Image (tube, rainbow, N blue to C red):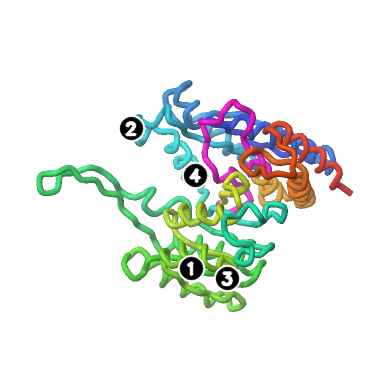
Amino acid sequence: MRTHTLAVIHGDGIGPEIVDEAIKVLDKAGEIYGFHLKYLPCLMGGIAIDETGVPLPPETIAICKRADAVLLGAVGGDKWDTLPGHLRPEAGLLGLRAHLGLYANLRPAKIHKPLANASPIKSEIIGGDLDIMIVRELTGGIYFGERGRKTVDGVPAAFDTECYTVPEIERIARVGFSIARTRGKRLCNVDKANVLESSRLWRETVTRLAEEYPGVALTHMYVDNCAMQLVRSPRQFDVIVTSNMFGDILSDEASMLTGSIGMLPSASLGGGSFGLYEPIHGSAPDIAGQGIANPLAMILSAAMLLRHSLGESEAAAAIEAAVNAALEEVRTPDIYEPGYRKVGTAEMGDRVRELTEEASP
């Protein structure tokens, strides 16, 4: 039997609840498709601060580096919002991405047909087959640039610096081109080249690389226009490649096209098969412990883990099919509508687990 090792970071808020549901589904997929998963729990985020004094303990970095992939719930919460920036839970996530060299964040925004009516956008605009992949640069840009406080003309001021090197842009652009080549062969580069010098270098670099991918049609769009077009005409997009800050904002906007941010998974990848997988939503401390969180984005992140890092594509497809089938029957409160049975976190996980078995050969 094939054995894979996963580092598991439950995190804060609803993180432990949704991670447990994903593990339940992963174990069932392993039983069906002939692999075993060994889990290595570790701490990051607010819980790590409470127990160790830092958001990213060295032991966590070491465990993640030994694993085949990392499964992450969510980090953060009001409890830690008053801490200095370098000690906040989110600093742990940024640090882990940097330590693991995870520079490419894949954020799919895909309509699940049973949820088509949940989108706030008219059905004639999104259609029933919306499928956008946002490729976000993850370890550079303004989130990692020089920052600080100073005095300007006698008053307090703050600054954050956006900086990208050509190699950083090249490697994320190659990810975008490569993914576009396997999909609709269309790549939209999103920047702010009419204003920002970093965006001008970004656009020049992406344009130059396009010569290496003659089968992919490259277009460029300013980020403000892209934000509008995602609402006005989202089906014009296939793959979007963009910087850290822009990708963070646009992928959250794109998530609402699908009806719920609680439905969208993500993968953070480096140069090989290793990756970190997490839902794009936050820790939702306001509903933590109530058993009502939607675990589907976490479960779909686990499916991405199987496909991209472990090479278990059949199991990944079975889980994705099970999620779609579950949505025809049951709904958590965030996606509930009349005509379906309302369930909690564990019940949704149980149903996906059962349907994963039913979807198997």
Circle 3 SS class: helix
Q: Which mark is residue 84?
A: 2
Residue 36 x, y percent position in the rendering? 77, 36
266 relative to 30, above or below: below
Q: Dividing the picture into quarters, in which one does residue 120 lie?
A: bottom right
Label 3 crowd bin: few (<14), some (14–19), many (20+), radius 10 Å: few
Instruction: Identify which residue is drawn at 82% across, 38% down.
Output: 354
Q: Which residues are magenta?
A: 270-299
Circle 4 SS class: helix
Q: Going by the picture, which residue comes out furthest to the left? A: 154
Q: Going by the picture, which residue comes out furthest to the right? A: 361
Label 4 crowd bin: few (<14), some (14–19), many (20+), radius 10 Å: many
Q: Which residue is mark 4?
A: 97
Q: Which residue is mark 1?
A: 189
Label 3, label 2: how far apart the Cα atoms are: 42 Å
Q: Amino acid at mark 2?
A: Pro
Say if mark 4 contacts mark 3, CB within 8 Å. Answer: no
